[in-house]
Amino acid sequence: MSIKIIPYLLLLAALLPVRAHAQAPDSVMSATLREFTVARQRETRFNLQPVANGFIWSGKKNEVISVQNLDAAIAEKVPRQVFSKIPGVFVYDMDGAGNQTNISTRGLDPHRGWEYNIRVNGIISNSDIYGYPASHFSLPFEAVARIEMVRGTGALQYGAQFGGMLNYVMKGPDTTRVVSWETVNSVGSYGLMSTYHAVGGAKGKLSYQAWYSRRVSAGYRRNSESQLL
């Protein structure tokens, strides 16, 4: 054997124990989780009952949006996020401040929601049969419990608007207490400050509720300041 090979053999013999140690069993611990069952998921969109409030909704195109369960910017009142789960809805962000909900379906013009019969608790909010309902009444989404939308022939019972009917169902008072108070406050970029306060309750057969909202923003571009009182 050549003397020149001996150093290499010694080096190989020194590395063998190291390599053998690297082949040791994996030390990662494993655990078996207990079985669980998902009872229900958080619902953000569903439909009206087949029969509700004296109307038959079975087979008619309608949707209901649960505003309080939405993963959306409620304080900024971004309609694109609120109606994102409804197929066929087009929202036009005309002012960029959330003061108007410019919405349409069926390929119609969304300008100020004039193709929709817009109601609040079933009461029409349009100041005339047509016109600009999004400009007549702009309410904060913190005060809305759900949004009901009826499209197609099912909306003809509400008016002659081609888009359909949009109904904002407001939150009701807490009837378990005489006086209850709710407050929602938000701050954000570009000087956004939003505050919402609601007071309500019930005493016997009498129930009441009142709310106040204010939102101001400097806007993300020049001359885009807005105030909602």
Image (cartoon, helix red, strand yellow):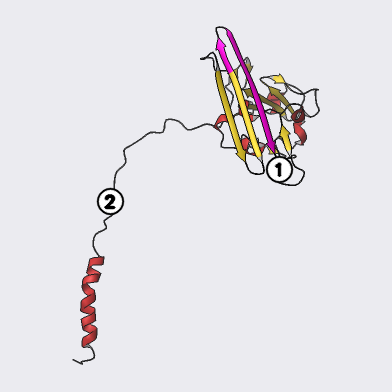
Where 10 sits versus 78, above or below? below
Q: Amino acid at mark 1?
A: Gly
Residue sitting nearer the eye, 70 or 202 = 202
State the image coordinates of residue 87 (x, y, percent, origin top left): 63, 37
Residue 212: percent from the left, percent from the top?
Answer: 65, 24
**Helix, strand or loop at mark 2:** loop
| Image side of residue 108 versus residue 28, left or right | right
Q: Give the residue type that dot 2 points to.
A: Met
Provide the residue span drawn in magenta. Answer: 200-221
Q: Of residues 24 and 151, which is closer to you in this image?
A: 24
* Mark 1 surroundings within 10 Å by alpha-carbon count, few (fewer than 14), some (14 through 19), many (20 or more): some
Name, please, the residue furthest toward the top: 204
Instruction: Name the side, left or right, on which 90 lies relative to 197.
Output: right
Query: In this orientation, which residue lies closer to the viewer: 122 or 210?
Result: 210
Q: Specify the quadrant that holds the C terminus.
A: top right
Horizontal and vertical percent for residue 185? 59, 32
Residue 219 drawn in magenta: yes
> On the image, numbered disc 2 is attached to which residue?
29
Asked whether, in this view, residue 168 is left or right of residue 45, the answer is right
Q: Is residue 105 magenta?
A: no
Q: Nearer the viewer, mark 2 or mark 1?
A: 1
Give the alpha-carbon distance from disc 2 to disc 1, as whole Å. Answer: 53 Å
For residue 219, the mark is 1
| Residue 183 as seen in the image, left or right of residue 126 | left
Secondary structure, magenta segment, majority class:
strand
Q: Quadrant of residue 74?
A: top right
Residue 112 sits above or below residue 30 on the image? above
Few, some or many residues within 10 Å of mark 2 (<14, 14–19, 20+): few
